[in-house]
Amino acid sequence: MNIVFIEYSAILIFFLISTILSILLFFLSYIITPQNSDQEKISAYECGFNPFDDARSTFDVRFYLVAILFLIFDLEVSFLFPWSLVLGKLPWFGF
């Protein structure tokens, strides 16, 4: 039992230090930063509607289309990147 504790003590110490540090940083950031909300913070950001409005209000479908197009092209680029790295080594069948 003692040997197991010695082997895993480094991991336990790491988790304890990281937990204490994350809690400390969270509370320090909450205490240090000002909590004042101005007109810029509560204004509509990327979605185009008031953030403190009814959640069931209708809005334009174009926002959904832009999000879907972004995801499609983002995924397409992520699939094309590895292919472009080995483009010179691909045989004719790879095209």
Image (cartoon, rainbow, N blue to C red):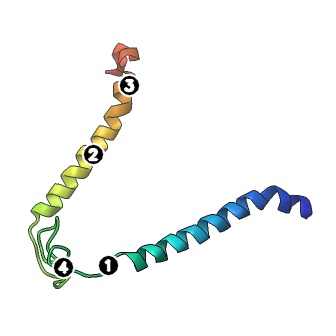
Crowding at mark 2 (Cα within 10 Å: few <14, some 14-19, many 20+): few
Instruction: Identify residue for label 3.
Output: 85
Query: Which mark sits nearer the N-terminus, 2 or 1?
Result: 1
Q: Residue at x 14, y 72 (%)?
A: 44
Q: Nearer the viewer, mark 4 or mark 2?
A: 4
* CA separation in Å, label 4 and label 2: 34 Å
Q: Nearer the viewer, mark 1 or mark 3?
A: 1
Say the numbered circle drawn on residue 38: 4
Q: Position of residue 56 (x, y in %)?
A: 18, 82
Query: Which mark sits nearer the N-terminus, 3 or 2?
Result: 2
* CA separation in Å, label 1 and label 3: 47 Å
Crowding at mark 3 (Cα within 10 Å: few <14, some 14-19, many 20+): few
- Numbered circles on residues, count: 4
What residue type is disc 4 on? Asp
Crowding at mark 4 (Cα within 10 Å: few <14, some 14-19, many 20+): few
What residue type is disc 3 on? Leu
Query: Which mark sits nearer the N-terminus, 4 or 3?
Result: 4
Say the numbered circle drawn on residue 34: 1
What residue type is disc 2 on? Asp
* CA separation in Å, label 2 and label 1: 36 Å
User: What element does badge 1 sit on?
Assistant: loop
